[in-house]
Amino acid sequence: MVNNAIKHTEETTLTIYITKNADAINIMVQDDGKGFDANQLANGIGLKNLRKEILIMEGNCDIDSNPNRGTTVNIDIPIRN
């Protein structure tokens, strides 16, 4: 995810937030790059692999991106006791 942002987005700022609460870990990656049409790339191999790995961990992944607006990827992974 971070590697793709660096390679493809032409961003000037890449921000990564990692937070933990009692129930989950949240990872949010934001860039101010060129963005993309999330509907067109939703089935790309990189996004498929990301979603597959998160699904294995019973997590959620939301991707918000539009051309010329940057991208935000928000991942929640539950913590198992």
Image: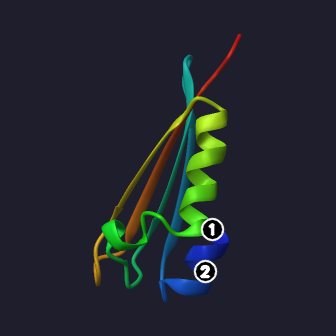
Q: Residue at x 39, y 77 (%)?
A: 32
Q: Position of residue 17 (x, y in %)?
A: 54, 51
The residue singled out by tag 1 in the image is 2
- Toward the viewer: 77 or 18? 77
- Amino acid type assigned to the residue bearing label 2 in the image: Ile
Q: Position of residue 63 (x, y in %)?
A: 40, 57
Circle 1 sits in a helix, a strand or a loop, which is it? Answer: helix
Task: Check the picture and name the quadrant holding the N terminus.
Answer: bottom right
**Marks 2/1: CA–CA distance:** 6 Å
Q: Is residue 19 left or right of residue 80?
A: left
Circle 2 sits in a helix, a strand or a loop, which is it? Answer: helix
61 up-or-down from 29: above or below: above
- Kindly give the residue lying farthest to the right in the view shown: 81
Report which quarter residue 80 is drawn in: top right
- Residue count near mark 2 (Cα–Cα under 10 Å), binned few <14, some 14–19, many ≥20: some
10 up-or-down from 55: above or below: below
Q: Position of residue 62 (x, y in %)?
A: 40, 49
- Residue count near mark 1 (Cα–Cα under 10 Å), binned few <14, some 14–19, many ≥20: few
The residue singled out by tag 2 in the image is 6
Q: Residue at x 56, y 58 (%)?
A: 48
Q: Is residue 15 left or right of residue 32?
A: right
- Amino acid type assigned to the residue bearing label 1 in the image: Val
